[in-house]
Image: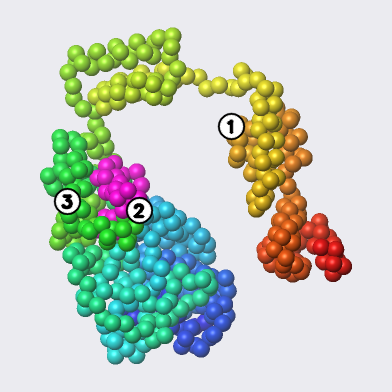
Amino acid sequence: MLDYLPRPYPDELLYSVLARGRVHLGVVDQKVFMRMAFGDGKVTAVPDLPSHIDSLVANISYLRKAGPEQLIFKHTLFPLFAPFIPRERKMQLVDAMRGNHGESIHVRSGVSAGKVKPSAWFRICPACLDDMKATFGEYYWPRLWQVTGVEVCPIHGNKLQDSSAAFRALHRHEFTPATPDTCPRLKREIYLLPGQESVADLVKQLLALGDIPSPNYRQWSHFYHNLATQSGAGKGLHVRHSVLTTRFTRAWPTTYLKRIGLVGVNGELSWLEALFRKHRKSFSYLEHILAWIVFRPGESASVILDEANQEPPEKIHAVNQPESCSSQEREKKRAAWMNLIGGKGWKGIKYHREHGYGGLYAWLYRHDRQWFMETNQERHLPRSNHSDIDWAARDRKLARILLGINRKSESISGTPRHSRNWFLLKLPHRASIEHHIDKLPLCKAFFERYTETIAEYQVRRITERLVSAKQSGLWRSRWELERVCGLNRKKLPELTDRFLSWIEVEIHANHF
């Protein structure tokens, strides 16, 4: 049990507070410190969005008074994500950070799938380090420096530089403190990229906002549609994305956008166009900020978020409403569609959209949506109940494919375990095969005969390693085989253990 933790410094990461606490207590073993702080030695040291916060608060008296929310909003990077995700997901993230299961935090926040990735290293401002030493007597990791997109210190104007401490450490349970060893004395560099000070300032504002309401997707859609109109990129009910892209690329150099991961392989800015369309997903804080700096220069983050929160939360934006047209043209298009769906060659909406009628479908969807959707609901093709499938013929066809896959895999080394799922992934109609395997006796017999158990897979891997060792002239002892094959001797299946024991005897007898 731990009842000591140093008080956080201004804007300090919780990760940094814990790293300093370990140094103050003189605890060398990271897992021992984790058991003291969290009551669990398996907690992962995560700098940006940590978990197990309730467990930590329960052990530290001054944290119990403040509460876990204060740690989350003042000493993690959670405030950067909170305004841009739906309220329900935001509450789920808070619960996950407070709880003892943080596996889904980076997925729910959008970090895992997003374009903006965390820095590889903790970053520092050499001038600020001198100030820390003079004021506090030690270094620490401020939040602002670690935010991707922020490349300049807003206080000194220096370029932020990489330390020698990895942001995602190789050892998952290690809290690395900011020290003279991890923060080497680097030359101060002035960095004057236009707009960089604005990025740092807006990020700083977001970090300081605390728990504020989050606009939903429709509110963000309304906000950006209005922003495009205000910026002179409106065209009736639509948006001229080429105008927005031209203005944006004039403000932000491609080199900077590449560094932060916001330029595609071919130099496209697809995310910018999506930002000004109907929102169906969350965008990162940095994508929002870069757009604000170009199209709402000088505006504070709180004003922009208040404006977005005042947008209608449910009303569908005007850009998605049916467009006006003459009644004569509407009747003409309706008649053409009715002739199509009433004819003998009707094969379903999707088929005809892809075979010459995509333009007619788009026109009716845009100009006569309500009639169009009601009409189509009555003309959906009935779903098949599989009564017309020749299961015997399908069984023979799939069995031949499976045998071919098996023959080909036998000549290739290093393939994954030949499990039933591995074979199924290589077949068409995978879900249908799984659900109707009793109607496919040849496939069922194939799986029973040719799929590998874990022990058989391990024996195959060991054999491949032995063949490779014999060809290279390097003999492998049992422990070497276990290591290169990633096997744990305490958890070996009986077949694998017997095979390795036989190999060991044969090697000692020089039969290999």
Specify the quadrant that holds the C terminus: bottom right
What span is colored magenta in the figure? 263-289
Q: Earlier in the sequence, mark 2 or mark 3?
A: 2
Relative height, residue 199 to residue 238 (above, below)? below
Q: How many marks?
A: 3
Q: Is residue 162 magenta?
A: no
* Amino acid of disc 3: Arg
Residue shown at 33% from the left, 65% from the top? 148
Relative height, residue 38 to residue 420 (above, below)? below
Residue 331 visible, this orientation:
yes
- What percent of the width, then of the height, locates residue 120? 41, 68
Q: Earlier in the sequence, mark 1 or mark 3?
A: 3
- Measure the alpha-carbon separation of dots 2 and 3: 27 Å
Residue at image mark 3: 247
Q: Quadrant of residue 236?
A: top left
Q: Residues within 10 Å of mark 1 (few under 14, many from 20)?
A: few
Residue shown at 33% from the left, 15% from the top? 337
Q: Quadrant of residue 165?
A: bottom left
Q: Is residue 271 magenta?
A: yes
* Amino acid of disc 1: His
* Amino acid of disc 2: Ile
Q: Residues within 10 Å of mark 2 (few under 14, many from 20)?
A: many
Label 1: element kind: loop
Q: Quadrant of residue 405?
A: top right
Label 3: element kind: helix
User: Of 54 and 252, which appears nearest the observer?
Assistant: 252
Residue at image mark 1: 429
User: Of 393 and 17, which appears nearest the observer?
Assistant: 393
User: Of 294 and 312, which appears nearest the observer?
Assistant: 294
